[in-house]
Amino acid sequence: APIKVTKICCIGAGYVGGPTCAVIAVKCPHIKVTIVDLNQSRIDAWNSPDFKLPIYEPGLENVVREARGRNLFFSTNVDAAIEEADLIFVSVNTPTKKSGVGAGSAADLNYVELATRRIATVANSSKIVVEKSTVPCRTAESMRTILEANSKPNCRFDILSNPEFLAEGTAITDLFNPDRVLIGSLQTPEGLSACNSLSAVYANWVPQERILTVGLWSSELSKLAANAMLAQRISSINALSAICEATGANIDEVAHAIGYDSRVGPKFLKASVGFGGSCFQKDILNLVYLSESCHLPEVAAYWRQVVEMNEYQKRRFSKRVVDTLFNTITGKRIAVLGFAFKADTGDTRESAAITLIKDFHSERALVNIYDPQVEHNQIWSDLADAIPQTPVDSIKKQVTICSSALEACKDAEAVVIATEWKEFREIDWEAVYAGMNKPAFVFDGRLLIDADKLRKIGFKVTTIGRAE
Ligand code: NAD
Ligand code: UGA
């Protein structure tokens, strides 16, 4: 019979491990959940008495308040949590490799391997080990080999793949009410039994028909495929936005018309300055690498184009700003509203705003930045990484971080909307206009504002996917 899970350990207290396992703790009060990480300051933040959590996610604080100290614990004692658990999620980061074989496209599996080896070393009893991180197809095989080669005599390890589909900014609602939970296992009696154990955990709140059980390799590949297809929709609509700008068609109207076809559907068709986030690019490149490894160059080229279109979209947008401002922005002040890669998150990984600011910086513009959630230190460290040849002190001569949208727009020639924060829709645009140099330009990279209303105030407005 499948073992009944009573203690869960999650290795990796990041954007995925933290919210996912906090929700499991809330929904399964009978299960003790311990989330561990090597990063002491991250764990301290999860444990902070005033709930200053390490990530910003609507609804997360309430979840942690409900379960922390009851059946939810955060710790740096990785070994103790592994030792007592029956089921272990591996939820560590899997970034794109920066050097060595597959640099620039393959996933760096070092953290997954270190966590796996730690499990093998520490475990004195049998465990179900669950890949939560996004990994290349057949990683479970490597994990099993490592675990079996290092295990103690009476320990058996069953490996499951259980990729996470939450999106940042809506993580808690996504976890409370997932479209589906996907569990991959070997189709052996032991594999299926482990799958049932994990499935029973989710069954505490997820309807049975939304818990999909498949083979291990299908599960691993489905995660890469899902992100690739989502990103492909954005690159498709962004490619069309370029045609709209050239022809006078309106991308919002086009997206609306296409999305009405029930086979296409209306969601995820918003043209933008480009997708960001830690995963879309990384996971597509991972799929590209997999395709190349399988000697499928045409398939690799097909998916790579999704990333290239995204780079093109960001470049195109910066160029449009420069072109519109009479072909030079040198010495001009530009207010960039939004630094996070999407609204309702403080996460800046691969944010399109970073690329735009880098471009403006290289044109020697003065840049004012405002974002309601991103920490100032994060902005400086992202800019230092993006503009490596320039010391931060000299970046600071051109770039200023502001504490409100109004402040950022003061004395600017142009306002660039880079993130779709709701508060940017509600800005007092009359006041912004009064404080700006004239002509005052607005560039909407997110189809966020009412362009006609702003034109009435006096702004010159340029919108993505429209001729003006
Ligand atoms: P993250 O960087 O926020 O968190 C990973 C954490 O793992 C870090 O805090 C790190 O210190 C810790 N860690 C690394 N090695 C460790 C070890 N050996 N022992 C203990 N802790 C260790 O990453 P994330 O955004 O949570 O992503 C994790 C995985 O989930 C990635 O594979 C990612 O592709 C996938 N994913 C992410 C999202 C998302 O929205 N961010 C969504 C779905 C899937
Ligand atoms: C994405 C997927 O949506 C999740 O299902 C997946 O689990 C996750 O990646 C992951 O594997 O990390 P996330 O990156 O958090 O989630 O956020 P999205 O809402 O997908 O947005 C990604 C980027 O695309 C953002 O920059 C967003 O602004 C942009 N986007 C999104 C658009 O430009 N247009 C759209 O219509 C939708």
Image (spheres, grey):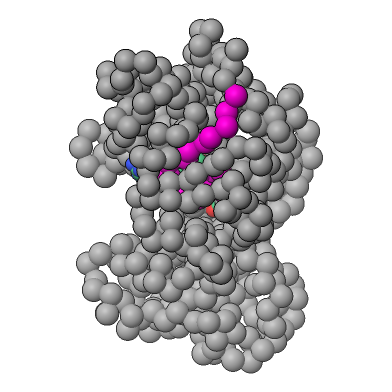
- Where, quadrant-wise, is the C terminus in this rendering? bottom right
Residue 457: quadrant of the picture:
bottom right
Residue at x 45%, y 25% (from the top left corner): 127
**Between residues 335 and 39, which one lies in front from this camera angle?**
39
Range covered by the magenta-colored residues:
4-21
Residue 450: quadrant of the picture:
bottom right
Q: Residue furthest bottom?
A: 434
Measured from the top left, where is residue 35 in percent x and y? Answer: 48, 46
Residue 42 visible (yes or no): yes
Residue 279 visible (yes or no): no
Q: Is residue 30 left or right of residue 407?
A: right
* Above or below, 285 relative to 357: above
* Above or below, 219 relative to 94: above
* Above or below, 58 relative to 188: below
- Where, quadrant-wise, is the N terminus in this rendering? top right
Residue at x 45%, y 83% (from the top left corner): 333
Q: Is residue 13 magenta?
A: yes
Measured from the top left, where is residue 281 in percent x and y? Answer: 44, 43
* Image quadrant, ligand 1: top left
**Between residues 266 and 3, which one lies in front from this camera angle?**
3
Residue at x 66%, y 41% (from the top left corner): 29
Residue at x 41%, y 24% (from the top left corner): 125
